[in-house]
Amino acid sequence: MLRVGRIRYINCYPVYGAIDRGIVPLAGTLVNGVPTDLNRLMAAGELDVSVVSAVEYARDATKLLLLPEIGITSDGPVRSVMLFSKRAPQDLGGKRVVVSRSSMTSVALLELLFEHVWRCRPEFVPGDAEMSDIARFEEEPHDARLVIGDAALKLFDESTRGGAWAERYPWREDLGAAWKAWTGLPFVFAVWVARRATPVHEALSAHASLIASRDWGLEHLDILSQQASESSGVPVETCAEYFAGLDYRLSYPHLAGLTEFFRRLVLAGRVPNGTLAFLPAA
């Protein structure tokens, strides 16, 4: 049976909501994990179709095919990929920046922003794979930290309300907004891929289910925002604003942003090439 990967953060609710509810059938089994888990399983051949970090596709494009018309993107602020800092980013040269192990794309984007926008070189230190308990953030000495997923959204919400978190991290940089200001393009954080070894008809079936489920999800964001609030502890209105700021397509502007990201990674020697290859149509 086809094995289909799913990120367990709430940002995937709009894509999998109808599948989870049995509204849209999926001829396969779902496997949950953080982005790096799914990247590893795809590389090991233990998943057939999955959402993966955009960087993971670029690093292993010879074994993967992009699924058309579906991704996790933002054309400006994303809110769930945030740098929380005790000082201005341009003043973090030589300072300790804790980065998440959970998303290679977010770390690669952060490195590019420090190199080309903030023009300094911090000391990057891998942190916990997931920091769902934001009260633990001070356990690791740091001047700034990259936070992704539900924890980032929760900390963003709490810090915008003022109080201790806003005082602790007076600088909060949204990486989606920083990329948009730098390049003028949308940013693609994650893509759906199939292994080239997966039978095409099975991959196409999964793709059709994911598209149908996404379309249902985008029409029922009120239901998904309530579910996201219950699972993450973030207010419903914040979850609704979060979903409204994301785009789950791969249109031409998104592909332009993805290509530009890959181009810069190739120039930096971080990925072998930036070629995009898609699952063929039926």
Image (tube, rainbow, N blue to C red):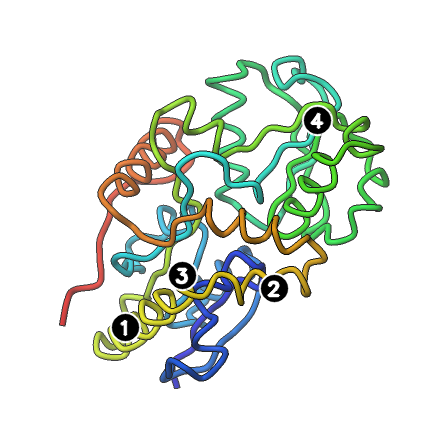
For the residues bearing labels 2 and 3, Cβ distance under 8 angstroms: no
Relative height, residue 117 to residue 49 (above, below):
above
For the residues bearing labels 4 and 3, Cβ distance under 8 angstroms: no
Q: What residue type is labelled 2?
A: Gln
Q: Which of 229 and 26 is in front in this view?
A: 229
Q: Which residue lies furthest to the left in this view?
A: 282
For the residues bearing labels 4 and 2, Cβ distance under 8 angstroms: no
Q: What residue type is labelled 3?
A: Leu
Q: Circle 4 is placed at which residue position?
A: 85
| 111 displayed left or right of 150 | left
Q: Circle 1 is placed at which residue position?
A: 208
- The first of marks 2 and 3 along the sequence is 3
* Residue in the picture at 28% in, 37% down: 259
Q: How far apart are marks 1 and 3 (CA)?
A: 16 Å
Q: How far apart are marks 4 and 2 (CA)?
A: 30 Å
Q: Which amino acid does label 1 sit on?
A: Ala
Q: Residue 201 at what x, y percent from top left?
A: 21, 78
Quarter occupied by residue 188 = top left
Q: For label 2, count other residues whose C-alpha is less than 10 Å away and answer few (under 14), some (14-19) or many (20+).
A: some
- The first of marks 1 and 3 along the sequence is 1
Tell me the number on the disc at residue 136.
none
| 175 displayed left or right of 188 | right
Q: Circle 3 is placed at which residue position?
A: 218
Q: Circle 2 is placed at which residue position?
A: 226
The N terminus lies in quadrant: bottom left
| 47 displayed left or right of 201 | right
Q: Residue 236 at what x, y percent from top left?
A: 63, 56
Q: Residue 3 at what x, y percent from top left?
A: 43, 77
Q: Which amino acid does label 4 sit on?
A: Ser
